[in-house]
Image (tube, rainbow, N blue to C red):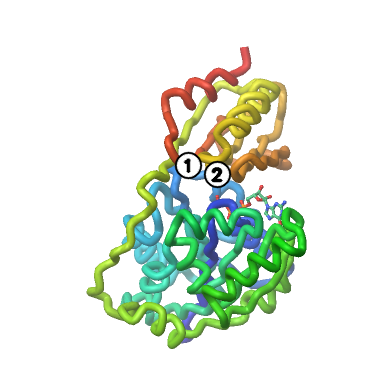
Amino acid sequence: MSRIPVTLLTGTLGAGKTTLLNRILSEAHGRRYAVIVNEFGEIGIDGDLVVGVDEEVFALNNGCLCCSVRGDLIRIIGGLMKRAGGFDRILVETTGLADPAPVAQTFLVDDEVRERTALDSIVTVVDARNIEARLADSDEAEEQVAFADTLLVNKTDLADEAGLATVEARLRAINPVARLIRTRRCDADLGTVLDGAFDLDRLLALEPDLLDSHGRHHHEHDEGVGSVSFRIDRPLDGRRFVDWIGMLLAIRGADILRSKGILAFAGEDRPFVFQGVHMLQEGDFAPAWRPGQKRESRLVLIGRNLDAAVLRAGFEGCAAA
Ligand SMILES: Nc1nc2c(ncn2[C@@H]2O[C@H](COP(=O)(O)OP(=O)(O)OP(=O)(O)O)[C@@H](O)[C@H]2O)c(=O)[nH]1
């Protein structure tokens, strides 16, 4: 039986993993992809931000793929293998906080998973603007870079040539062999990105215990990083929300690493998708609510020193009168 290739998409919070995933899924490829998205916040958002009607998206919420939800991952893959017709490829998007080693390990040591799937490549999306800060404050960022077969140096529009050269030198020092591609909104040639560059020997040199299924998973997440998630049934006043989040990120954007929401604004028939990475924010209306999608507002904030009660009160204060 042929093994299904698995592409692991990793990279720090907000680097552009979902952007890459959507690019892969949007291309006229004629292939059947199964998508597994793992999120840190307890209210899933990413599952709704992934494009495509044909693909099946499995969301693993509230936990880091490299820790608590690993058993779920094994179960999902087991379920996928039983599907009639099967899939041509499995795409796994990890949370920005994940260490890729134990995720890769799942595909390399679990007998059933290994029989049916083959890790094909590890693609790490790098936020050219924020990678230096992430390398300074988290071990996972460095592991993500070290494990990559392909490094997409993304968000080149937000850095100048000198900044990009510095970032690339830093990446090269951590990982001298990965293919390095500069991208804007992950606009890399997808044939190149999905081409099976995975090299087990290289990973074993980095992590000699990788194939030891009894090896303990030692890593610890940055203790200070947490997430808060809110849900409101009542429609929001769009103006109030934009003012509130703008002020919040202006003041707390250094600590709020990532913010994202799917929002129901009063008087609007489409959901508003909000995205923030530190102070930088983007927002736009999605074409329509998905069938079965509840018309409510969901917001997730990931960062340090998040006071859930204060933030909840602020978000609830955005409800339309
Ligand atoms: N300016 C700029 N913004 C980008 C680029 N690529 C992605 N973005 C934006 O960055 C934000 C985060 O992108 P995502 O693709 O959601 O990032 P992610 O890595 O999936 O985020 P998490 O899953 O939360 O870790 C979104 O607002 C994107 O539109 C880029 O090249 N330039």
Q: Is residue 86 visible?
A: no
Q: Is residue 142 above or below residue 212?
A: above
Label 1's element?
Answer: strand
* Count of marks overlaid on the render: 2
- The reply to whether the C-beta atoms of the residues labelled 1 and 2 are less than 8 Å apart is yes
Please state the horizontal and vertical placement of residue 8, each as a whole percent of the image: 51, 69
- Give whichever of discs 1 and 2 has the lower sequence position: 2
Question: From the Cβ of disc 2, is ligand 1 less than 8 Å away?
Answer: yes
Q: Quadrant of residue 319?
A: top right
The amino acid marked with disc number 1 is Gly
Q: Is residue 93 visible?
A: yes
Which residue is drawn at the image coordinates 42% and 29% (left, top)? Answer: 308
Q: Is residue 182 above or below residue 17?
A: below
Say whether residue 49 is left or right of residue 39: right
Distance in Å between CA atoms under marks 1 and 2: 7 Å
Which residue is drawn at the image coordinates 52% and 26% (left, top)? Answer: 232
112 or 199: nearer the viewer: 199
Which residue is drawn at the image coordinates 52% and 79% (left, top)? Answer: 120
Q: Quadrant of residue 241?
A: top right
Please state the horizontal and vertical placement of residue 124, each as a whole percent of the image: 56, 67
Q: Is residue 103 above or below residue 256?
A: below
Say whether residue 47 is left or right of residue 307: right
Q: Is residue 205 above or below residue 103?
A: below
The amino acid marked with disc number 2 is Arg
114 or 164: nearer the viewer: 164
Circle 1 residues within 10 Å: few <14, some 14–19, many ≥20: many
Point out the image quarter for the N terminus. Answer: bottom left
Tag 1 residue: 303
Tag 2 residue: 258
Please state the horizontal and vertical placement of residue 19, each as a whole percent of the image: 65, 57
